[in-house]
Image (spheres, grey):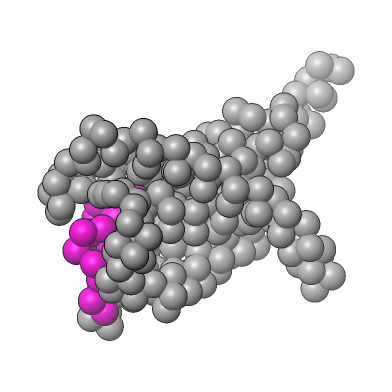
Amino acid sequence: MGALNIFENRAVKLTVVSPKEVALGAALGGAGALLFLFVFPKGSISTLMHVLRVPGPGSGIALVVGPFLVLLVLVSSLLSPAKGGALIASMAFAVSYTLVVRLFGIATDPKGAFGSASFVAAIALFGLAAETVMALSGALSQVWQCVLTGALANTVLLVFYWLVIFPRTVGWVKWKDIPLLTGACLVCGLVTGFVAWRVSAPLARAVKEKE
């Protein structure tokens, strides 16, 4: 009976995400999509990468899109005590972005296939990667969870773009550019993961105060 009680207690801790947590993740994802559309209109990311003289394709994903998503999904995950916050926020971001650009006819950069089915699949894979790394690194401290998740999820997104999206929109990445872009991707993911960890604590306190 003692063993059964322990099992039952553990099962309670693994309860699925509550409606409130789903709403929080969806709200963060939706707000993130609107913010991304406002801050990065069509062509802005490509122009920024051109000014910085960073090779591509993939620099915009590694340095801008991925880190933005890392911050968004990790904050959502850290604010939710249950599993699934990162995946919920990423899917809400992808769906909200796609709906807004299609409903309002907002022009997007065709290189990144933003608002397409491939884009939604890429963001979903990103969210799944983030959830997986967070789950597998549960024995580590929270800060290490965040930096590892940021680095690996960002890399997963970049590789997906290299293999699935960019070959159809701009062409294959050059072999000589892969080490630099991969390194930049890992560093940006690490840094953004750390930032997400730092900002999540005050945000969590603010959410608790409103409850």
Instruction: Answer above or below: position of 180 versus 117.
Output: above
Quadrant containing the C terminus is: bottom right
Residue at point 37%, 42% (across, down): 181
Please tell me whether residue 64 belongs to the stretch shown in magenta. no
Q: Nearer the viewer, residue 165 or 5?
A: 165
Up-down relation of residue 47 to residue 86 (above or below) = below
Q: Is residue 117 magenta?
A: yes
Give the percent coordinates (x, y) of residue 32.
Answer: 50, 68
Query: Which one is in front, 100 or 62?
Result: 62
Q: Residue at x 44, y 37 (%)?
A: 183
Residue 162, located in which quarter of the rendered image? top left
Q: How many marks?
A: 0
Say which of 42 and 31 sits in front: 42
Please state the horizontal and vertical placement of residue 79, each as a whole percent of the image: 69, 56
Viewer-nearest residue: 41 or 117: 41
Question: What residue do we see at 68% from left, 36% from top?
Answer: 144
Q: Residue 35, image x and y in percent?
A: 48, 74
Residue 84 seen: no
Furthest residue to the bottom? Answer: 104
User: Compared to 106, does 83 lie above or below?
Assistant: above
Q: Can you say which quadrant of the picture contains the N terminus?
A: top right
User: Is residue 105 toward the left or the right of residue 17 in the image?
Assistant: left
Q: Name which residue lies at 74% across and 64% down.
A: 203
- Is residue 133 in sight in this rendering? yes
The part of the chain drawn in magenta is 106-123
Q: In the shown orientation, is residue 136 left or right of residue 81?
A: left
x then y, percent, for residue 91:
43, 56
